[in-house]
Amino acid sequence: MGDTRRTVLISAFSLLISSFASAQWLETTIHVPDSLGGLGRPQCLVYNSTGNTVYVGDEHSGSVIALDGVTNQRIAAIPSGLDALALCYNPAGNKVYCANSGSGNVTVIDGATNEVIATVPVGSCPCALCYGPTSDKIYCANLGDHPVEYDSTVTVIDGTTNTVVATVPAGKGPYALCYNSSDNRVYCANYYDSTVTVIDGATNGEVATVPAGAGPNALCYNPADNKVYCANSWSGDVTVIDGTTNKVVATVKSGTWPGALCYNQTDNKVCCANYSSNDVTVIDGTTNGVIATKTVGYYPTALCYDSTNNKVYCANEGSNSVTVIDGATNAVIDTIEVEDWPIALVWSPVQNRTYVANYGSSSISVLRDSADTEEQ
């Protein structure tokens, strides 16, 4: 009897140690504004892998804040245009791009000096960016001023010269972008006409227009199977597009109002956050079948993937929390409280941190994950 009890206690202790070994926690909260220049409403994030720096874009201040990835200290306040709505990083040139929806331009920031090196005019209300490494180009989706007019274009910027090399017609209300590394193509989800425009990365020409569900508003790419996933907010589903043929190969039912996607390369899964049903749909990358539906916090609005620990982080705008999902088992393993209105996430692999932009409280929550419990 004593041996049985001892075995149970040892097993429980081992389980506890295993749980701690993969724990995640709120490490710090960075409040802005400060002496470097303030953020009124942080709403987008990007990670600079060369400099181990996190950049934060803001709706009101007309600046981008650079955070040191080691110390979490604010190291620069970089002037941008109005309403910084999207950021992306060019590792080849060590540059950060900021789409300013209020001023119709893109600010180009030197990743080494954190200085502005160019301001590139684009279309009306630029709202999404992505980088195409094969041709060293940056793509900017211009949403336009609905309902007065649609811009319906994607601006293509040369990554070396910082100049516009093409303006590509898209559908109505270009809203989201993603890059297909296998075929050097860019996909643009057009919110108001329920299509996806496919752009050739070499020629900048339109390759195809693919029908999607109603209100497409998020995209992600699966390199293992060469597929593009498009979340359709109005129809509550995800369109799966073959990256070679540009044909729709599946339509996967999700929760209500899907609005964010991320790819788990370890297990070849796609996660879809459903804003109105407060859950995350997990899709098998090979079969396109739904593997799981996991309840998270209220109004999940952003996702990011931690490949070191094989975890998915989900920002819940309505409950001021971040849900952590195990990438292998799809189990919810933690819920971390953050400040008001978390709407954007980015993962930093060097210190294994996830940064959360809290739109409603002018702050950045820094979440830590480590196999070394002594770091806590």
Image (spheres, rainbow, N blue to C red):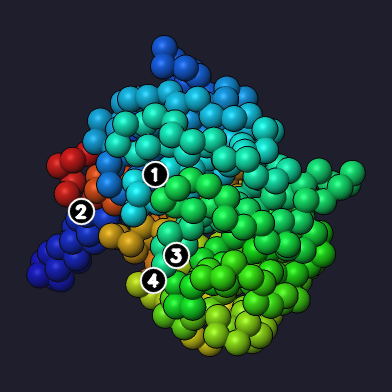
Q: Secondary structure at mark 1?
A: strand
Which residue is at 44% across, 78% downward? 182
- Which residue, given by chain and number where applicable, does mark 4 sit on? 265
Q: Is residue 155 above or below residue 44?
A: below
Q: Which image quarter is the C terminus in?
A: top left
Label disc, if present, on residue 135 of the rendered structure: 3
- Which residue, given by chain and number where applicable, does mark 2 sit on? 371
Which residue is at 71% across, 56% downward? 153
Q: Are marks 2 and 3 in contact (CB under 8 Å)?
A: no
Q: Is residue 4 above or below residue 346?
A: below
Side (left or right) of 376 relative to 3? right
Side (left or right) of 330 relative to 229? left
Real-space Cα distance between discs 4 and 1?
25 Å
Q: Is residue 71 above or below residue 89?
A: above
Q: Secondary structure at mark 2?
A: loop
The quarter of the picture where residue 364 lies is: top left
Real-space Cα distance between discs 2 and 1?
32 Å
Give the mark nearest the N terminus, 2 or 1: 1
- Which residue, given by chain and number where applicable, does mark 1 sit on? 95
Give the mark nearest the N terminus, 2 or 3: 3
Q: Position of residue 344 (x, y in %)?
A: 53, 44
Q: Secondary structure at mark 3?
A: loop
